[in-house]
Each structure stands twice: as C-alpha cells, then as structure tokens.
Amino acid sequence: MPSPKAPSSTKMRAADVAYDAIESMIVTLQLKPGAPIVESELIEITGLGRTPLREALMRMSSNGLIVQLPRRGLIVKDIEAAEHVTLIETRRVIERLIASSAARRATPQLRQDILACGEQMVAAANNGKLEEFMAADQALDHVIHEACRNPSAVAAVIPLIIKCRRFWYAYQHEGDMHEAARCHMLLAKGIAEGNEEAAAQGADNLMNYLESYTRKVING
C-alpha cells in the first residue's frame, strides 16, 4: 500500500494565508463574536480555495477562536471577560519562560530588533496610533519568539496572545496604550540587555497590567 503524500508547500502556504487573513478579521472584530462562519463569503474575501480555508478553520477551532454549535454550525467564539482572567494566569507562566529564554539565547541582531519594536510601540502610543501600536506589538512578539528558541512554549502561548489581542480591540476604550507600551518596553530592555531576571519581571509587569485592565472591564 503506498504511503500518503505529504502536503505540498503551495497548499500549506495557501492555508497559512487563509489562517492569517481570517484571524485578522476575528481579532480586529471585522468578524464579530457570535458571527457565523460562512465559507462562501470567506472564499470570496480571501480569494483562496475551499481546502486551504477549511484547514485554516480547523486550526482556529483548535485554538478556540471559533466553535461548532449544534444546528448553527461554526461561529466566532464569544469574548468572556471572566474567562480571560484565567487565560492571563496561564499566559503569565509561559511568558516568563519565553522572556528569560530570549534574554539568554537572543543573538545581537535580535536584541536590537526587540529594542526597536519596543521603541515603535512607545512612539505609536505617544502618537495615539492604534493600528501602528498593534502592528509593533505583533512584531515584538514574533522577534521574542524567534529569540527564545523554544517552539513548544511559543506554540502554547500564541493562541493566548491572539485572544488577548482581540480582547484589546473589543475593550480598547478601557485600555491605556501608554502604560501598555511602558510595560512592553521594560520587557524589551530586559531581553535586549541579556538580563534574565529583568526580562521575567518585565513579562510579569505586562501580565499585571493585562490582568488589571481585564478586571476593570469586568467591573464595568
């Protein structure tokens, strides 16, 4: 019996493109919580085929961005503020590991890149540019994840980060870009300086801010 063929790189790239496009729509609330997932509409928006789209939706289901409901099909998962507190508890543990590992393992170039991303977040906050702030935040995550060289920790934290980013878009009126940028900058400096303790503390400070912000949303 012949062995199954490995998926082609073209197919994998298409699925990744579909995932990134739909994830962005969910995170930025273009696809709102509770909205139905309509394959034909997503195919038209992304310009991709049904197979890569379904692969992307399977990944999103495993990440908890979409859920299958009886008689309703796939829908975008609701944002539950109380559940978000426990999400941050989990993220805190992983982020400490990633931060300290990045401080220990980052190359000189990655240290420069991490600092630059932190500076971009501060500049965006000072200018009140939300989209630039979120882009710099995402770029900082990517370079820290590369620097830490711990794929299992990165795989575990990415779904949590995505949900946190969506929470921020949903409740940005309760957030403080300046304080968030300050916390990210402390994290970036700790990693850039190779100081594992400062990097871990920076991660803690960021999680402290996210938790206080979440509780503010819950308490109205």
Image (spheres, rainbow, N blue to C red):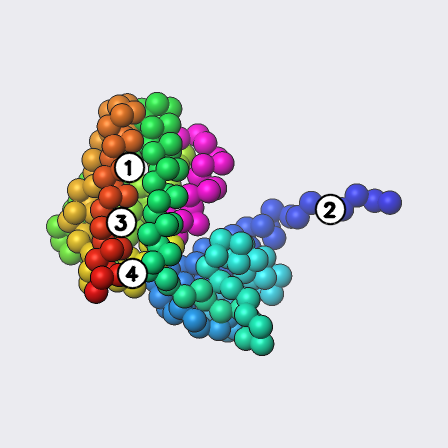
Q: Residue furthest right?
A: 1
Q: How far apart are marks 1 and 4 (CA)?
A: 21 Å
Mark 3 or mark 4, earlier in chain: 4
Residue 90's image quarter? top left
Name the element at disc 2: loop
Q: Residue at x 34, y 40 (%)?
A: 92
Amino acid type of disc 2? Lys
Mark 3 = which residue? 211
Q: Which of marks 2 and 3 is in front?
A: 3
Q: How far apart are marks 2 and 4 (CA)?
A: 41 Å
Q: Which residue lies furthest to the left in this view?
A: 126
Q: Position of residue 51 (x, y in %)?
A: 62, 61
| Location of residue 111 with respect to 71 vertically, above or below | above
Q: Residue 139: which numbered mark, if any?
A: none
Amino acid type of disc 3? Glu
| Front position in the image: 4 or 62 | 62
Q: Where is residue 98 in the image (x, y as percent from the top left)?
A: 37, 33
Q: Nearer the viewer, mark 2 or mark 4?
A: 4
Q: Residue at x 44, y 30 (%)?
A: 149
Mark 1 = which residue? 203
